[in-house]
Image (cartoon, rainbow, N blue to C red):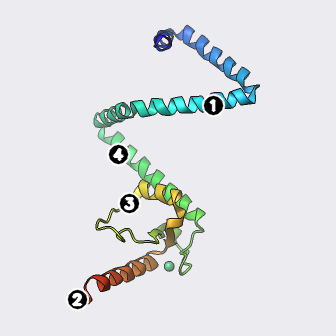
């Protein structure tokens, strides 16, 4: 607590703040000479930062929401476009890592239109179909690449069609399409 109050006081005074920063820089450089202590320092720092973020996550979200609410329309539009561009680039990079072609038929003319397909359909074993799109999908593919196949839209829809047919067969043998 005392340390926190001290820090708040230091932050008010630019000269003191500069001195404080230089001091911590020197301390860090000194620590670097001792690898074991430096490693420990880094680990503790990481832990501390994580805890701080966890403690303040709700506050930060609320602030971000407020900031966004009072933004001008142009700025909102700009943010929207930036996010979209980022998403497209992320997807493009990911598809490149996967070899830029359909893993069933080898289609590679326009790699941008390739799609990630769940090898085991989402609705198997559950009643609910939870759709994952955009950033969440990219994150999921990165975390569990073994769950996915990269297919062209044609192969993808054919696979889905077959799965749906199978499902219909299982459920209603008389009312097949
Ligand atoms: Zn294909």
Give me the C-alpha separation between circle 4 and circle 2: 49 Å
Q: Nearer the viewer, residue 172 or 21?
A: 172
Q: Is residue 74 above or below residue 173?
A: above
Q: Nearer the viewer, mark 4 or mark 1?
A: 1
Whichever of labels 4 and 1 marks the residue nearer the N terminus, that label is 1
* Few, some or many residues within 10 Å of mark 2 (<14, 14–19, 20+): few
The residue carrying mark 3 is 132
Q: First in sequence, mark 4 or 3: give its number.
A: 4
**Which percent across, then down, holds residue 2?**
48, 10
In this picture, residue 95 sits left or right of residue 124:
right
Residue shown at 38% from the left, 83% from the top: 162
Task: Determine the residue located farthest toward the left in the rendered image.
Answer: 175
Ligand 1 closer than 8 Å to label 2 CB: no
Closest to the observer, 135 or 45:
45
Q: Earlier in the sequence, mark 1 or mark 3?
A: 1
- The residues tagged by marks 1 and 2 sit, at their Cα atoms, a distance apart of 64 Å
Which image quadrant: the C terminus? bottom left
The residue mark sitting in front, 1 or 3, is 1
Q: Nearer the viewer, mark 3 or mark 2?
A: 2
Tag 1: Cα neighbours inside 10 Å, few (<14), some, or many (≥20)?
A: few
Q: Residue furthest right?
A: 33
- In the rendered structure, the answer to whether residue 95 lies left or right of residue 130 reads right
- Queried on whether the Cβ of the residue with tag 1 lies below 8 angstroms from ligand 1, the answer reads no
Q: Secondary structure at mark 2?
A: loop
**Residue at the extreme front:** 125
Residue occupied by mark 2 = 175
Question: At 42% across and 52% down in the image, what residue appears?
Answer: 84
Q: Nearer the viewer, residue 81 or 148?
A: 148
Q: Which residue is mark 1?
A: 42
């Amino acid at each position: 607590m005392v340390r926190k109050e001290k820090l708040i006081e230091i932050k008010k005074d630019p000269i003191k703040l500069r001195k404080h920063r230089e001091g911590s820089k020197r301390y860090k450089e000194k620590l670097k000479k001792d690898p074991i202590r430096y490693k420990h320092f880094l680990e503790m720092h990481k832990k501390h930062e994580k805890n701080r973020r966890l403690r303040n996550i709700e506050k930060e979200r609320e602030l971000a929401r407020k900031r966004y609410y009072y933004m001008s329309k142009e700025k909102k539009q700009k943010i929207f476009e930036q996010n979209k561009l980022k998403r497209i680039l992320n997807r493009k990079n990911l598809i490149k890592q996967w070899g830029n072609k359909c893993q069933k038929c080898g289609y590679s003319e326009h790699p941008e239109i390739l799609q990630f397909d769940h090898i085991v359909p989402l609705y198997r074993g559950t009643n609910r179909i939870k759709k994952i799109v955009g950033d969440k999908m990219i994150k999921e593919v990165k975390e569990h690449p073994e769950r996915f196949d990269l297919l062209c839209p044609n192969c993808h829809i054919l696979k889905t069609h077959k799965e749906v047919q199978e499902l219909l067969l299982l459920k209603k043998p008389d009312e097949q399409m």
